[in-house]
Amino acid sequence: MFTFHSIEDYQTALQRGSTSCFEAVEFYLNKIETARHLNAYTNVYAQEALIIAKKLDIQRKSGKPIGKLHGVVIGLKDVICYKDHPVSAASKSLQNFISIYNATVVDRLLREEAIIIGHQNCDEFAMGSTNENSVYGNVLNAIDNTRVPGGSSGGPAVAIQADLCMISLGSDTGGSVRQPADFCGIVGLKPTYGRISRHGLIAYASSFDQIGIFGKNVPDVALTLEVISGNDPFDATSSHTPVPEFRKLAKLANGDKTPTRRIAYFKEAIQHQSLDPEIKSAFLQFVDGLKLKGFTVEEIDFEYLEYVVPAYYILTTAEASSNLSRYDGVKYGYRSANSSNGLTEFYKKNRSDGFGKEVKRRILLGTFVLSAGYYDAYFTKAQQVRKILIDKTKLIFNNFDVILSPSSPTTAFKLGEKMDDPIAMYLADIYTVYANLVGIPGISVPLFQHTNGMPFGIQAMTNQFKELPLLQFSHYLMQQFKSYENPTL
Ligand code: GLN
């Protein structure tokens, strides 16, 4: 039977003729069918994926050199545009919308011969931490169906966790790749802001949004990053920084040679009252383990931790209120049947009917913090906090190569647990939003298991555009410290 361990193994098997792209796609289509109850996919492109697979098999057998992602079966979060396919941001306001162009990442995946198998469920407009804000309904955590997969990229995470594709692409504005990766026991990378083009990614908060990658292991994530990174004329914020050959990282990943020798963690993060005691003690033991292996690990002061969540929610909701103004029922978005009482009523009705509760809450909040009377008190203040955080981060990386923290203060929540308390839900983003505020890369590496049976990981962050040492270090951690076994990995 078909099994998938890594892209490298899979492509070796393809070259040897012991499997085919067609067999791989069939395998995943069957798995997706039997895992329907998890609700990970919003649309599956079965026939099309099979046809592409067949074509790739013929090309390969004819001796044509293969692309870097030849035959790799990939799912896309439902915020990434794939020409002539539906994309809805899991919102009623975009249901039945068909993409008229490819996101740049999709072009790059296809150019390297990946097979896109479907779109995956998420929180509406990527706003949430549990995938409970989706018009398509909840996604279930495959390890424990009474728990959430995390969010907002719940579908992409579960698709890897339950072996429903090889790689998923998500988006991470404040943790939406790292936190669900943590809750599901898989690898989740958010690259540096600007590393990957956002062209064709439905915007939530443009100065925070970044496409991220879910995989079973670090080398697969590294290879995908190599393919989708790099400057794009369609996104003025995408960087010209050269893209290293990330896929070669595995060969460099000997612990003694990782360039990340100087490690810091924030005292305030580890002493935080919201941190689960078991996660805290695992983290501290892990730090001791790193020291034993010769790393320098220091606890440092980070007196700004309490400000990161408020600053994040002020700035992202402000940006969201502007980004989402286009969904008015004229340019884009849901148009209500009965809305003939003048233009204001028309917009109001379309937007009231098209958006869910959390999206409306954020649009209201964002409009409020940008309003003339409150702009300086909230938006300007939060921008100042962001600047202070950026300056502080530069200083930290003068002395350290990597910052470590838990990825999330707890393991996966129970379904519904935080739905009536949005503030509690927001506060649980305490460890992830920092990387987006300052634009640095962060990865969640699945290492441990809680006594409640759920996985949890470590978050590692490096300076901007230092993904290579970040990936090398993460790969090393997976080899040296991983005590959690996900049945599908
Ligand atoms: N949980 C965060 C939020 O609700 C992160 C979302 C994201 O990264 N898209 O905003």
Image (cartoon, rainbow, N blue to C red):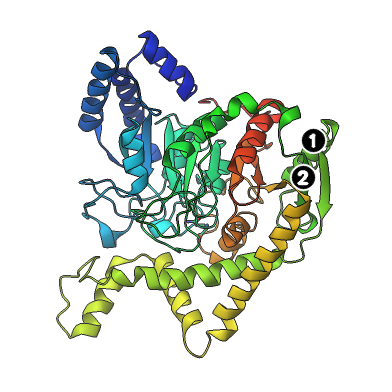
Mark 2 Cα shell of 10 Å, populated few (<14), some (14-19), many (≥20): many
Check residue 290 in the rendering and tell me which mark sits there, or answer none.
1
Vertical placement of 433 versus 218: above or below? below
**In this picture, residue 450 sits left or right of residue 437:** right
Task: Say if mark 1 contacts mark 2, CB within 8 Å.
Answer: yes
Tell me which amino acid carries mark 2. Answer: Ile
SS assignment at label 1? helix
Q: Quadrant of residue 27?
A: top left
- In this rendering, does residue 269 appear at all? no
Q: Quadrant of residue 115?
A: top left
SS assignment at label 2? strand
Disc 2: which residue: 263
Task: Give the x, y percent position of residue 166.
Answer: 42, 30
Could you tell me how many numbered marks the image carries?
Answer: 2
- In this rendering, does residue 283 appear at all? yes
Q: Earlier in the sequence, mark 1 or mark 2?
A: 2
Task: Give the x, y percent position of residue 374.
Answer: 53, 86
Q: Considering depth in this image, is 228 or 363 the residue closer to the camera?
A: 228
Mark toward the viewer: 1 or 2:
2
Q: Quadrant of residue 290?
A: top right
Name the residue: 29% across, 54% down: 88
